[in-house]
Image: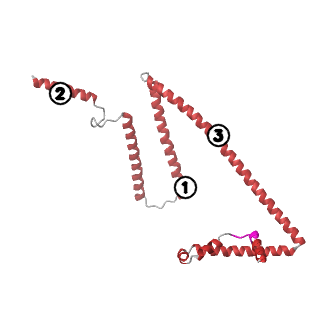
Amino acid sequence: MPNYNNLEQALKQLRENVAEFSIGAVSRDDYRPPDEKIEILRKSIHRLSSRTIILKAKKDITLNEEIPTTNMENIFQELQENTAKAIINNIAIEQCLRSSTILDVMSDENQIDVQEKMYAAMRKLFMLNDVILSTQQSVQKAFKKQLELKIQCQKAIFDHHSFLKEKEEQRKQNLQKTNPNVVKNKEKLMKTINKINIIKKLITNFIATSGKLLMKRPFLLEMLEKHAEIINEETMRKIIENADKD
């Protein structure tokens, strides 16, 4: 009789454990909600599908020995388009599943508490969306204004350069008529300045590429610093004035 009672208690406990055991779980410690299992299965299917596509592509490559005649640029363009479509479709499917879940919850009369929380979350989401749209519009207006100002600034700079160039041409023409020797001397000066700048660039480039030589001869650093700046007409004039003073 005691053995029978023990067996009956064991069967009762087994029945309770079976009733409480989660469907699809391997053990009592391996419990996952159905949503999490569906998400895991979906990711596994994505990985298996990707693996299948890769293996199929490798198989097609090994079997197809013909040289492709299609332009590679068109192939990459088609690949980018198909990848973009796949990403968009994946996002659309996820949004559809979420929308379907929301509709199921909203139509279920037994989930009033969840519906109220969802209404509150959706109100906050809509308010946040309005704020984001308003901020985005302000940013777009600011970018548009910045672009207009940049265009105006570039146009003003171009007009100023054109004005200076025109004034310089007029000054040259007037100087050519009144004193042609000054024009010739200035042309010679500009040619000399260009030659000096070319020599300075050659010196700095040669010295800069000789790392070991710089370590052995430190005076080259002073020469590099001395010839780093490019001279112009004004600096040349100052050099001549200083030479005359000396």
Q: Is mark 2 on a helix, strand or loop?
A: helix
- At a point 64% along the width and 40% down the height, the residue shown is 138
Depicted 136 relative to depicted 13: above or below: below
- The residue to which callout 3 is attached is 138
Horizontal side of residue 181 vs 43, given as left or right: right
Distance from Cα at disc 2 to Cα at disc 3? 71 Å
User: Residue type at mark 2?
Assistant: Ala
Given contact means CB atoms under 8 Å apart, are the residues at marks 1 and 2 in contact?
A: no
Is 8 contained in the magenta span? no
- At a point 63% along the width and 71% down the height, the residue shown is 225
Q: Residues within 10 Å of mark 3 (few under 14, many from 20)?
A: few
In the picture, the disc for residue 74 is 1
Is 231 contained in the magenta span? yes
- The residue to which callout 2 is attached is 10
Which numbered disc, 2 or 3, marks the residue that appears first in the sequence? 2
Report the span colored magenta. 230-235
> Looking at the rendering, in which quadrant would you find the C terminus?
bottom right
Q: Is mark 3 on a helix, strand or loop?
A: helix
User: Residue type at mark 3?
Assistant: Ser
